Image (spheres, grey):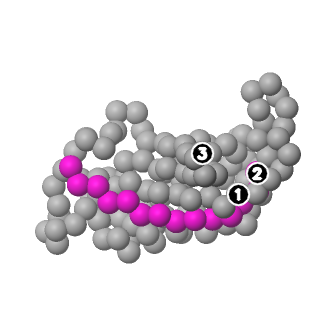
Amino acid sequence: MYTVIVEGAFSALHQVRLGDGTLEPPHEHDWLVRAHFARSELDDAGMVVDFSKAQSALRSVLAGLDHADLNSHEGLAGKNPTAEVVARYVFDRVSEPGPSVLRRIEVTEAPGCVATYGPAGLTENAG
């Protein structure tokens, strides 16, 4: 299995509702996002995906989140804007550049705090 990972970043504000119903104070993060693409065989050019196409697809989605209040962002309306929810939002919107498969999105909200999303049954080892 071959895997390519591209990264992007954005800054955004959010206020998370905790399990007991209380709200955290609004706060901002510099979010780091990594997109994992994988294929069992390389294409005719010897690549999983063209890095520039993968980066462009990711950065296009992240541009819409940059300097946003995630609580009022139209794509996250009605959702609790946790790192997990942001990971799913990005996954659903990153267009697959070429025949590669987007396996997962990894979101770092703060150092040491990482959430990932990838569809059930779709792992790094799937072809």
The crowd level at tag 3 (other Cα within 10 Å; few <14, some 14-19, many 20+) is few
Q: Please report contact status of discs 1 and 2: CB closer than 8 Å, yes or no.
A: yes
- The residue lying toward the viewer, choosing from 18 and 45, is 18
Residue at the (82%, 28%) spot, across then down: 21
Secondary structure beneath dot 2 equals strand
Instruction: Locate residue 50, reporting x and y percent.
Output: 31, 71
- Outermost residue toward the front in this view: 112
Q: Residue furthest top?
A: 20
Q: Position of residue 49 (x, y in %)?
A: 29, 65
Task: Specify the amino acid type for callout 2.
Answer: His
Range drawn in magenta = 1-14
Mark 3 secondary-structure assignment: strand
In the image, which disc is placed on residue 113? 3
What label does residue 29 carry, if any? 1
Q: Of callouts 1 and 3, which one flags the residue occurring earlier in the amino acid sequence?
A: 1
Specify the label residue 14 is tagged with.
2
Left or right for 22, reference 81? right
> How far is mark 1 from mark 2, CA to CA?
8 Å
Q: Amino acid at mark 1?
A: His
Q: Where is 53 relative to 36, above or below?
A: below
